[in-house]
């Protein structure tokens, strides 16, 4: 559905050249739900704007929905939907009218535009707002209307630039539910940008981590996490004198990485392993047969922030407060 090779965008800023996107190769198949994740200024929006023909690449190639962005931009535009960061919907129109007009603009006949308007409003739970002015909608409803606007011509590919920015946590979760459901029903390929770690983690099937204009990692959230620091298994012992024995047992497990004893309010033993869930049964058995009195155990998978930190030495959380 998308194939780019060495896609590059430079901006001239005064006398300087700013390399916003530095040779990106992306392959996205039909039906995928992919998030471009990265800090502010990483080049996500610039990439999206090139893929949606809003910005001409400095060099490189991009074929989107079967057409070349440079030589057939109008054909690309017909085959995609794009929801930008600002609101696409007008100010004084009513929600239903706005969507219907957008359908006519895309060349649909009146009956089809009317049917799609009703279907989309229904699918995005906006039917109750058909006659409401766009300015009177809540932030979440307005964002969903924007998404409907991007889908009215039934494109096989939808781009969403920071779809949930500015929404409260409840509306964000609700928006995601709708996007996920919509995709299940229509099979639309979705490419979106976000700097919310949890959002990429939970909603995207595949994540491209972008930093300084390059793709620095590509995979499912689990693959990205698995490739980094491994899981952290922490157990507390009821009797702190047993901690060294516990640590020794942990260190002898197959595939055990670094083991440390941390003394605080409770004495904890921390163990890095590739897969905490598979090591846990052996660990529990071994501790039990050695008579180590266990108070609690937990397994923490690495977060996407751990991934970003390992790859760049910086925390994405700090960069996107
Ligand atoms: N039209 C422009 N002229 C000059 N510089 C630009 C232009 N558009 C973007 N940039 C710069 O290119 C770099 C990449 O910006 P881009 O908006 O693609 O990042 P982003 O990852 O989408 O970040 P954000 O999450 O803030 O939208 C930034 O340094 C930005 O300032």
Image (spheres, grey):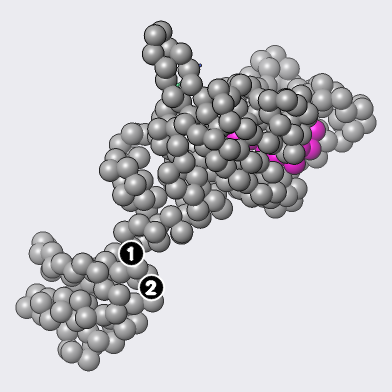
Q: Which residue is pictured at 79% across the width and 38% down the height?
A: 154
Q: Quadrant of residue 243?
A: bottom left
Distance (Cα) linking label 1 and label 2: 9 Å
Q: Which residue is pictured at 33% across the width and 34% down the height?
A: 319
Q: Which residue is pictured at 21% across the width and 67% down the height?
A: 258
Question: Where 33 sits versus 253, above or below?
Answer: above
Residue 92: image location, x then y, percent? 70, 14
Task: Kindly state the secondary structure of the residue where label 2 is placed.
Answer: helix
207 displayed left or right of 298: right
257 displayed left or right of 56: left
In the image as oriented, which residue stretches furthest toward the bottom?
A: 289
Residue in front for this viewpoint, 29 or 177 = 29
Q: Which residue is mark 2?
A: 277
Q: Quadrant of residue 176?
A: top right
Task: Kindly state the secondary structure of the residue where label 1 is placed.
Answer: strand
Q: Dot 1 surroundings within 10 Å: few (below 14), some, or many (20 or more)?
A: many
From the image, which quarter does the N terminus lie in?
top right
> Which range is magenta?
150-160
Q: Which residue is mark 1?
A: 231
Q: Quadrant of residue 195?
A: top left
Residue in front for this viewpoint, 56 or 153 = 56
Residue in front for this viewpoint, 316 or 129 = 316
15 displayed left or right of 29: left
Residue 235: image location, x then y, percent? 23, 72
């Amino acid at each position: 559905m998308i194939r780019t090779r060495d896609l590059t965008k430079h901006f001239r800023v005064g006398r300087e050249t700013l390399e916003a996107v530095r040779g990106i190769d992306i392959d996205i198949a039909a039906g995928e739900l992919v998030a471009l994740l990265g800090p502010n200024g990483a080049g996500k929006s610039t990439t999206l704007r090139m893929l949606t023909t809003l910005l001409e690449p400095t060099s490189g190639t991009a074929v989107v929905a079967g057409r070349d962005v440079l030589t057939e931009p109008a054909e690309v535009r017909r085959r995609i939907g794009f929801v930008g960061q600002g609101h696409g919907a007008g100010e004084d129109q009513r929600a239903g009218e706005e969507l219907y007009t957008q359908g006519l603009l895309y060349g649909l006949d009146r009956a089809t535009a009317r049917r799609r308007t009703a279907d989309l409003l229904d699918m995005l739970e906006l039917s109750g707002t058909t006659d409401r002015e766009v300015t009177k909608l809540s932030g979440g409803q307005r964002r969903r209307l924007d998404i409907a606007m991007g889908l009215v011509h039934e494109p096989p590919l939808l781009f969403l630039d920071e779809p949930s920015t500015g929404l409260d946590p409840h509306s964000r979760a609700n928006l995601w539910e709708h996007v996920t459901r919509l995709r299940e029903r229509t099979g639309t390929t979705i490419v979106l940008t976000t700097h919310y770690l949890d959002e990429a983690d939970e909603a995207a099937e595949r994540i491209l981590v972008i930093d300084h204009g390059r793709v620095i990692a590509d995979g499912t959230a689990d693959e990205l996490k698995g490739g980094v620091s491994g899981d952290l298994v922490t157990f507390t012992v009821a009797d702190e004198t047993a901690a060294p024995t516990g640590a020794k047992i942990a260190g002898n497990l197959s595939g055990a990485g670094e083991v440390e004893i941390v003394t605080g309010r409770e004495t904890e033993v921390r163990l890095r392993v590739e897969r905490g869930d598979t090591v846990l049964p052996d660990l529990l058995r071994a501790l039990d047969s050695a008579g180590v009195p266990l108070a609690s155990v937990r397994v923490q998978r690495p977060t996407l922030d751990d991934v970003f930190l390992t790859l760049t030495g910086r925390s994405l959380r700090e960069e996107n407060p």
